[in-house]
Amino acid sequence: MIRFEQVTKRYPDGTTAVDGLSFEVAEGELVTLVGPSGCGKTTTMMMVNRLIEPTSGRILLDGEDIMRADPVTLRRRIGYVIQQVGLFPHRTVLDNTATVPALLGWKRGRARERAAELLDLVGLDPKTYGPRYPHQLSGGQRQRVGVARALAADPPVLLMDEPFGAVDPVVREQLQDEFLRMQATVRKTVLLVTHDIEEAVRLGDRIAVYGQGRIEQYDTPGAVLGTPASAYVAGFVGADRGLKRLSVTAIERGDLEQPPVVRMDETGQRAAARMRAQRARWAVVLDADGDLHGWVGLEELDTADAVSTLAHRMNAWVPVGAPLKQAFGVMLQHDAGWVAVLDGSRFLGVLTPAKLHEALRRSVDADAQGVARGQVDFDSVSDA
Ligand code: ADP
Ligand code: MG
């Protein structure tokens, strides 16, 4: 969808901001550009919508050289979100959001309808916030309006330059979560700049780690954290990269163990007999549909009562697909030796510390084999 081929940008004063940059972003992919201040991230971004023009090299959007495109038409296909948001202070939130559709000549009613939909999408009730002015919003809310406005003309591509940089850490995490939820539905091709490795790892399908004017590694978060390409990248991602990897590795069904299971409608004695045969001290209690009801300990079962009346509520659970970090957090919080993993309310199995460790190793092995996915072969390009 977006392809950089040997792109260099030299500013008139001689500064080389970007040097021979080659990478590709697939359609619907969210790529984060991360690196220290001044390494060329913003320059990279602004060349995509031609706010800055490359000194040499080519940028292709959907196969078309952007230098051949009409800049105005080009920018309609590209939403742009910046840290300072740049909302019009004397226009309401609704009108700010409707700016682009209005520029595109949409009828006023339709533009406002679209703006209301988008405010809803970014988690702002249009009835409450639509009539307000930007100064009547919090920083986080203003940032959401910026995102809504960038999406207004439904562009396939979204450029975001430090979009969550100006808000406090708690709001920031909230905005990141909401953005990921939104991205799961709208599936834009996104380039997002950040100087924060945590943010890059959390949001990116892939991350480009920048050194001075060039990309040092371009790969999945798991691979960058698991197998940094150089000492520079290892230093940039931090000594706690093993811990960070917990938050980008999802729990899979294959990671789970199957503990002893008893049914809600059996008697305690019957369940106890079966558990003794398996030498189990506790069991998971499921209902007839395989949904999780709770858990019981062996010593509580020597009665004719139904298991359903004896079971304890199970608080230590996570949904399948959640990051390992979440499972680890739940284990610590409930002081539990394992957590139940559910698909909806259906019980799939439990994750133990040993399995968690295995899953973490699996993620590194898989990423090491999958490195080719993140590489682009430009030799064929220069011949063409
Ligand atoms: P980042 O976004 O990663 O902080 P930038 O792309 O803004 O980095 O800048 C990369 C380099 O280019 C920096 O050294 C910066 O000072 C320089 N630079 C940016 N804009 C200009 C400009 N208009 N003229 C000269 N140098 C510039
Ligand atoms: Mg910048």
Image (tube, grey):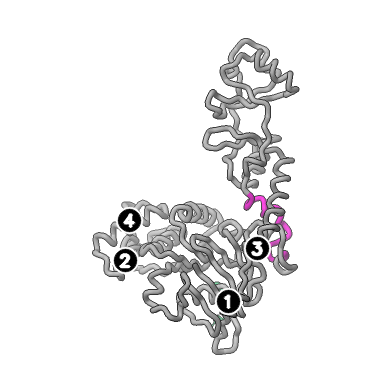
Residue picked out by circle 3: 372
Residue picked out by circle 1: 381
The one nearer the camera, 51 or 162, is: 51
Looking at the image, is 353 positioned above or below residue 267?
Answer: below
Q: Residue at x 67, y 41 (%)?
A: 255
Query: SS at mark 2?
Result: helix
Q: Is residue 62 magenta?
A: no
Q: Does the magenta stretch mainly form a helix, a strand or a loop?
A: helix
Please report the bounds of the magenta region as a residue range: 234-249
Any mark on residue 116, and which? Answer: 4
Dot 4 and dot 1 residues touching (CB under 8 Å): no
Q: Label 2 sits on what residue type? A: Pro
Disc on the earlier residue, 2 or 4: 2
Q: CA distance from mark 3 to mark 2?
A: 40 Å
Residue picked out by circle 2: 101
Residue 94 image offset from top left, x and y in percent: 32, 60
